[in-house]
Amino acid sequence: MSDLKTLARITALEFLVEELIKAPKVKFKKLHVDAVLPKYQTDGAAAMDLVACVDESVTLWPGAVVAIPTGLAIELPEGYEAQVRPRSGLALKGISVANSPGTVDADYRGEVKVIMRNMGEMLIVHKGDRIAQLVIARVARAEVVEAVDLTDTARGEGGFGSTGVRA
């Protein structure tokens, strides 16, 4: 009988592992005829590219923060989020995602927009430009527990550079 219990536990664990590594199904709804579904640019890419869906080109002046529409709404499975992140090529030019990473919650059904911040030279965003990356990630909801004391650590309350700069 114990062999059957062991086999049942192994089968259950194998099932859980398969579920954890299985790619989640993420639905995208086009809200605009010109919207472009995000896609991975290479087989090894961790993120999909998000594409601007603007009726007219948008000028991002230095210092500007602008929400650029993608023309897409998203449906994520429960237990997942979508993280909107800067593209490295744009970041090198001073263009970033203002709330990086921006979180799209599983229960949000509105249009996904990218809040772009320009800390560099003027940039014109055209319809069809790849403007950000989208990473689909598993999330855990924490149980919040109020505590009178916290466990001491070697680091303690040290923050904001307290561990030094040099390797």
Image (cartoon, helix red, strand yellow):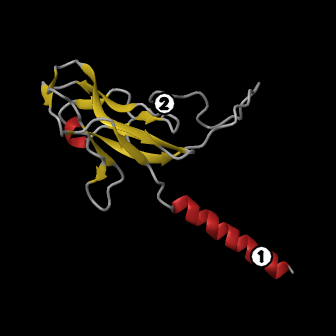
Badge 2 element:
loop
Above or below, 39 against 19 in this view is above
Q: Name the disc covering residue 141, or none.
A: none
Residue 124: name its quadrant. Answer: top left
Q: Residue sitting at 22 percent across and 24 percent down?
A: 119
CA gap between label 2 and label 1 equals 48 Å
Q: Residue sitting at 62 percent across and 37 percent down?
A: 154
Badge 1 element:
helix
Query: Mark 2 — residue?
Result: 162
Q: Residue sitting at 71 percent across and 35 percent down?
A: 151
Q: Name the disc covering residue 6, or none.
A: 1
Left or right, 90 with respect to 105, comes to left
Residue 25, horizontal then vertical, whole percent: 46, 54
Residue 137, horizontal then vertical, whole percent: 47, 47
Image quadrant containing the C terminus: top left
**Sequence order check, earlier mark of 2 and 1:** 1
Q: In the depicted view, which residue is nearer to us: 108 or 85? A: 108
Residue 59: name its quadrant. Answer: top left
Q: Residue sitting at 50 percent across and 61 percent down?
A: 22
Residue 164 visible in the shown view: no
Q: In the depicted view, which residue is nearer to us: 161 or 26? A: 26
Q: Residue furthest front?
A: 33
Give the class, few, some or many, for how many residues have Cα within 10 Å of label 2's Cα (few <14, many ≥20). Answer: few
Left or right, 11 with respect to 80, comes to right
Give the class, few, some or many, for how many residues have Cα within 10 Å of label 1's Cα (few <14, many ≥20). Answer: few
Above or below, 24 against 109 in this view is below
Nearer to us: label 2 or label 1: 1
The amino acid type, in three-letter code, at marker 2 is: Ser
The amino acid type, in three-letter code, at marker 1 is: Thr
Q: Residue furthest right?
A: 1
